[in-house]
Amino acid sequence: MRHLFLSKGLFAGLVVLGASVAGPAGANPSILFDVKTGQVLEHEEAFKRWHPASLTKMMTAYVAFRAINAGELTLQSPIKITKISAAEPPSKMGYKPGSVMTLDNALKMMLGKSANDIAAAIGENVGGTLPAFAGRMNAEAQRLGMTGSHFTNPNGLHDPENYTTARDMALLVRAIRLEFPQYGSYFTIEGLTTNGKNRIRGFNPLLGRFAGADGMKTGFVCASGYNLAGSATRDGRTLAAVVLGERTPWGRADRAADLLGQGFSTAASGSVTLGTLQPYGENLTTPTDMREIVCSKAGASERSDGLDANGKPKFKSPYMAELNRDLQFVRVGLGGATGPAPAAFAAIDAKNNQANVPIPTWRPDRPAPTAPVAAQGDAASRPQ
């Protein structure tokens, strides 16, 4: 069910003060909102549970920002790679256990490359253990009113109990943007370099292609499909869109661009906000699994059909333009940690470079597909 709150679509007596337009059967969730006011401009299946994949890393960053505010650590504090974090599957940086970096660089790697090993390292160092950090993530989600979300790890690697909703992700995006504007640059990273030569491209194709785009994060696992939370600012107005479960990495960008473009081009009215939007829909307690659609031969064929002769994506949204400049790469690396170690850092076994918790088992629950798509993370989602 698609709901519009644009001024030319308001009709009395329809659902929550907005025009209700039936969407396609099994439509995937999305939501468009004004970051400053929280006003909802459009939404579809906004309360349907979905696997967040690497959108989870936005909550990991949020918990780290809150820890900085609480005086637990600083951006220059050490983040140590343990055996547990080093063993996480791609996408990853691949640093050896015992390697130490600043929290600043860890955040850049986690959000710019979507590095699962770095996200786990942040979780261990800030939380002491991965379960303890997940507890902090869930506490923050509850405080923010994310009633349809539950987190089991800091990186979004697939777990049946790791789920969210489009509306909940919107709450998180808004909290990050309003509470921590000083950290906005972490979500605008277009690429990373470790030595000035080797370059790692980012995953958000809105940057440089959609006018005013200024973040936030993408995510992919087979069970989730292709997710994107994207924001843009024009003439002092910031809108954000959350899109879950698209079939291709460029499809999620097209969908987000359409939502944002229409939002900026149409005056909005109405009083429905992220906080007052009421739950709706059916089957709200079981997360959708996109594995058979996305990680199959048919899914691989669909992605191939979306590429031109040079292997570049063919964006369909009229709001997407050609990238007519070089990507901006941010340099990252190890060392330089001069800030205080987080309290949990002392709980890490210095001898073994390992936290005293069992190594978590990565589980997709089925064998890896034969189609050429990454099992977890954004490694096969490069839009460039």
Image (cartoon, grey):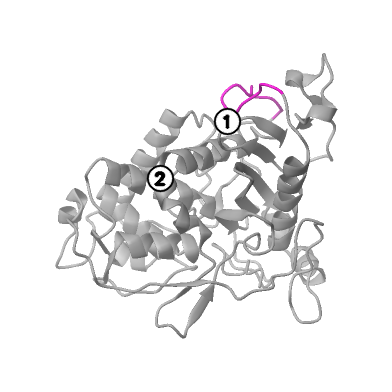
**Depth check, front residue: 227 or 261:** 261
Q: Which residue is mark 1?
A: 37
Counting the numbered discs, the total is: 2
Q: Identify the residue shown where x is 54% and y is 57%.
A: 364
Q: Which mark is residue 62?
A: 2
**Depth check, front residue: 38 or 95:** 38
Q: Is residue 282 left or right of residue 102?
A: right
Q: Is residue 226 visible?
A: yes
- Give percent across and percent down for residue 140: 39, 35
Q: What's under tag 2, amino acid-wise?
A: Tyr
Residue that sits furthest to the bottom in the current view: 197
Q: Is residue 44 visible?
A: no
Q: Residues within 10 Å of mark 1 (few under 14, many from 20)?
A: some
Precedes in sequence: disc 1 or disc 2: 1
Quadrant for the N terminus, please: top right
Q: Identify the residue shown where x is 43% and y is 83%.
A: 196
Q: Identify the residue shown where x is 40% and y is 83%.
A: 195
Q: Main secondary structure of the magenta part?
A: loop
1 vs 2, front mark: 1
- Give percent across and percent down for residue 304: 78, 72
* Rendered position, 74 above or below 173: below
- Give percent across and percent down for residue 359: 33, 59
Q: Which mark is residue 268?
A: none
Tags 1 and 2 touching, CB below 8 Å: no
Is label 2 in a helix, a strand or a loop?
helix
Q: Quadrant of residue 213?
A: bottom right
Magenta range is: 270-282
Q: Residues within 10 Å of mark 2 (few under 14, many from 20)?
A: many
Residue 22 magenta-highlighted:
no
Q: What's under tag 1, amino acid-wise?
A: Thr
Residue 274 magenta-highlighted:
yes
